[in-house]
Image (cartoon, coloured by chain):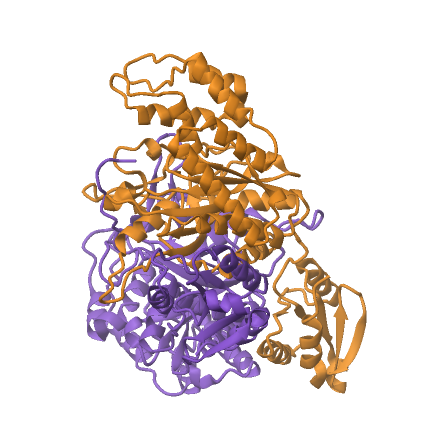
Chain colours: A purple, B orange
Amino acid sequence: MSDYIVKPERPGGFLDFLPADYLAREKMLKTIETVFRQFGFDPIETPRIEFKKILAGETSDTGKNIFHIKQSDNDNEPLALPFDHTVPFARILAANPYNPKSKTGIRLPWRRMVVGPVFRSDNPQHGRFRQFYQFDADIAGTSSMMADAEIVALMVRTMEALDVSNFQIRLNNRKLLNGLSLLCKIDDRLSISHENIVYEMMRILDKLDKIGKKAVFQELRRAPESPDDPAPHLSDDAISKIAAFLDIQGTNDEKIHACEKLFNNIEIAMTGITELKEIFTYLTAMNVSLKQVSVDLSIARGLDYYTGPVMEMALLDAPQFGSVFSGGRYNNLVSRFTGKELPAVGASIGVDRLFAALKHLKLIDHAQQTVADVMIIRIAPDRDADYLSMANQLRSANVSTEICLVEDTTFKRQFNYAISRGVRFVVICGENEFDQNKVQVKNLETRKQIELDVEMLVDYMVQETSKERR
Amino acid sequence: MSDYIVKPERPGGFLDFLPADYLAREKMLKTIETVFRQFGFDPIETPRIEFKKILAGETSDTGKNIFHIKQSDNDNEPLALPFDHTVPFARILAANPYNPKSKTGIRLPWRRMVVGPVFRSDNPQHGRFRQFYQFDADIAGTSSMMADAEIVALMVRTMEALDVSNFQIRLNNRKLLNGLSLLCKIDDRLSISHENIVYEMMRILDKLDKIGKKAVFQELRRAPESPDDPAPHLSDDAISKIAAFLDIQGTNDEKIHACEKLFNNIEIAMTGITELKEIFTYLTAMNVSLKQVSVDLSIARGLDYYTGPVMEMALLDAPQFGSVFSGGRYNNLVSRFTGKELPAVGASIGVDRLFAALKHLKLIDHAQQTVADVMIIRIAPDRDADYLSMANQLRSANVSTEICLVEDTTFKRQFNYAISRGVRFVVICGENEFDQNKVQVKNLETRKQIELDVEMLVDYMVQETSKERR
């Protein structure tokens, strides 16, 4: 034990969940889990610590906001905390190839879900978490657009199960954006390849929401300042094509039709359009309302690994929370480990952001403060063994029961404690009741109190606690 | 994307849980959680990262096996990963005192449970985990032995719920061991206080199981090698008292009686004996079989913070796994943060160790490999929209359904996939069936196949999947 006092504080960007918050969040997580399992996504868990080289490669600058582990022995391979669940998913896929003889390993296609914290070593600031839960569903091992459509349907069904009705899924295809770069005729340049320039172009386009069209065009026009500066340096003609693309308006069908005209000769973009059409066909088959899924040609998704359809979900009544559920197709994430492509598509919920948004929309029920339904208060001296026996009988019947352990055993003090704890029922039994084999039960929601024969207590409480909380 | 290949490996001492293991472990965790909630323990969650000063103090050598976070900015307060849930529990208690006016903060007594990973930066070696789950229940804010008895009852009920029958809870009281140090007349010595010497004596006694009585006595006799060496340096007379104490045999009552004789004049030990007796009275009231709880005077529990009753659970048919559920009373953990004592008692399950032990005892059911109950296979070309529609209807009725997405859509290939995935039912619908509005359902457990009208499919699957898995 140390002799001086440590201030009991928590680092910025990390949360405690006390019971009321925990229970409300748990309900949301269970709802999500139920939907994900209906779709057949199998749960897995990966460790909180991975080799840094797995997470970031050894050259990538993704390393910047990774929490690194300090190890005493410097010869050890560096460790770090995962910043998402997708990279560990790719590691697991690469490490467990299916062996048809021994029937071990992961048989593809594989659909898995995962929920747990991920870590970003950002500067702590208000509303920015350094640990936050992500809830992911991914399907690896198929290029079929049925998988992409299932992911979109999963997003819709999840929101419906959470009682959110006013949401929209914005759908695009990275192949259209790649087609756009071909329309803009981006070539290799000095010491920089056209892929790098295209990547920079995507990065700039992804800022559309934040900085607006004018600033985006300005950045796209910018000339390189050094031989390795990936500045796109687009011509007026190229910018006008991008503008035309971003100006495409109308219904989903109209947008798709306009794209077909614009990308007439560009094969990759035409493939992307076909994929979008296929997804809409499958969504219709799954009875998904197409009002809730719209083509949005401005969606790029920041990360560089997307290769096909990309989707983002917005809460229309709480747009300030941004996208709370998003994803897309990424066909070469596993190649980092195997050198081979493996098609995959998935989406991820930002759990803590979604929870904050649902709270804002008043869709989170905070009423439950405790798992205990019943509190037994101790007003007869020397009857503690009897109170414990009562608690044991209730618990054996699966009635969650707390025995009041406040030191001041006056009725008032214990009753106040029961109220502040948020239990639904108080069991009261004094000397009188013990003498007559009776017990009082007070319902704190209805304020009604009834007297029972002691042998009736368990049956009565089983019945009453099985009713919904108010 | 990096251009070279990274080996998809995981650091030693960290586990992946693939679906079959995840689902088996989930069942065990749910069983534990149900019992803990019956006892009214409310769930909380604390972050995976804390200030190092919170976890280890600034002088403690507990710091040795803590994972430290490497931060880019050296001015930041050092961060680390928690090595248990008890210290974060103490932090939360200290940071949220109850305010009777605003009715905010934590009202004591408070019973909370927590489950999640903790981290020890040990050298990775076989069977030694560096990340492992602990499942804790604690009651803070009462000195009543009712709380200690409830913790013991919780341990018993948890094991019963897990279908373990041959277990034993070993109960001791640190006050007896403190009394023993008084019997041995340990005084302050040069630059070292008697508390430190007593602590060293406890540490040595705790090794009884591992190194045996002879070696323990030898260590207890050892003379200090420097002024600050806490070696107990016990006399022959003191050793004979310890030997007498450790030789106490018999039933629980006989052991307690023998202690009363031995500790006749030592007040603290007599208090400890009274506490043990009280716990047994309460356990009897809770209908706990006293055969499963025995006084074991050799139990000390390694950590220095225990102040009263201590308990360890052993699986008698799997002793090699050691104690999988243990705890005790610690009345001054919070004082590190507040300078004041706060009584608390609790116990912790080593989840991964318990899981390994239950596996060894064949009490883990590994049969479930997937959450999907039904797989729809796609043998009619161009009917994908119909298959997705079928999947949507089943999922809407909460039947977990996977649609087969293997690229090779021959019947054989898809059927083999369904078997390897471990689903219970396969839905088969070819051109013929579509023409006749029929569908085939094959039960992979019974191998029976039936034909249904397509409109009967959902009702039939709801009924069949609600039956227990075999």
Q: Position of residue A442 (x, y in %)?
A: 44, 74
Q: Position of residue B31 (x, y in %)?
A: 57, 57
Left or right, B345 with respect to B292, comes to left
Residue A218 is drawn in which quadrant? Answer: bottom left
* Foreground residue among B242 and B162: B242
Quick check: can you spot residue B45? yes
Vertical order, B105 against A294 (above or below):
above
At horizontal 31% and vertical 77% (from top left) the residue drawn is A318
* Foreground residue among B160 and B100: B100
Left or right, B225 with respect to A308, comes to left
At horizontal 76% and vertical 63% (from top left) the residue drawn is B445
* Foreground residue among A297 and B87: B87
Vertical order, A260 against A14 (above or below):
below
At horizontal 34% and vertical 23% (from top left) the residue drawn is B197
Quick check: can you spot residue B378? no
* Foreground residue among A341 and A104: A104
Left or right, B416 with respect to A192, comes to right
Vertical order, B391 against A234 (above or below):
below
Left or right, A162 with respect to B81, comes to right
